[in-house]
Amino acid sequence: MLKNAMSHLLGTRRSREPGHLAVGRVQLPLPTTLSATLGCDAVGVPARYGFRLMSHLPRTGCVFADAERWWWIVPSGSDLDLDWPEQAAYARGTCVPAVRPRLIHQPDSRTPYTPPIPLFLMVCQVTGVAPSWAPAGGRRVVSAP
């Protein structure tokens, strides 16, 4: 699984020409065989955390990646009452700021989602931020490094 994800990610890096592509907003194309009845949002984390998150989550849904970020598909509204760390980018819907993200992981189940609470806790852990269930924009307990 991780070897396959790495080969897809490296393929994306090799195909980029420095300075040629600008980051724009792109729609993450979910596989048509998956049911997304809860709607979809995306959580982006810096690429350096991608493999660690994937290997420690109990269940991983669809994950897209480019050279800068890995995008995890979560149910719509997964930002409610969760104060995602500053290093994480939360996108409502699946239109994200990225350069040619590729699907690097597709779940075995029929749903594209990564459970948001375990993802939130792992993102907090790898970024060194204490989890906060305060509404977005509230005061952080521990600032991001």
Image: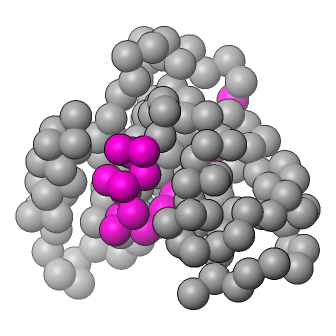
Residue 30's image quarter?
A: top left
In the image, what residue occupies the spot 71% across and 70% down? 130
Query: Which region of the structure is painted magenta?
Result: 39-56
Q: From the viewer's perspective, is 128 left or right of 5?
A: right
Magenta run includes residue 46: yes
**Rendering coords of residue 141 (x, y %):** 81, 78
Q: Is residue 124 visible?
A: yes
**Rendering coords of residue 34 (x, y %):** 48, 16
Please state which of residues 143 and 112 is positioned toward the viewer in this rendering.
143
Residue 32 to residue 140: above or below: above
* Placement of the N terminus among the 4 image quadrants: top left
Residue 143 to residue 24: above or below: below
Q: From the viewer's perspective, is 39 left or right of 21?
A: right
Residue 5 to residue 46: above or below: above
Q: Is residue 99 visible?
A: no
Magenta run includes residue 49: yes
**Rendering coords of residue 70 (x, y %):** 41, 55
Please state which of residues 61 and 95 is positioned toward the viewer in this rendering.
61
Please state which of residues 88 and 67 is positioned toward the viewer in this rendering.
88
* Placement of the C terminus among the 4 image quadrants: bottom right
In the image, what residue occupies the spot 55% across and 54% down? 122
Q: From the viewer's perspective, is 51 left or right of 43?
A: left
Figure disc tally: 0
In the image, what residue occupies the spot 68% across and 43% down? 117
**Rendering coords of residue 76 (x, y %):** 73, 37
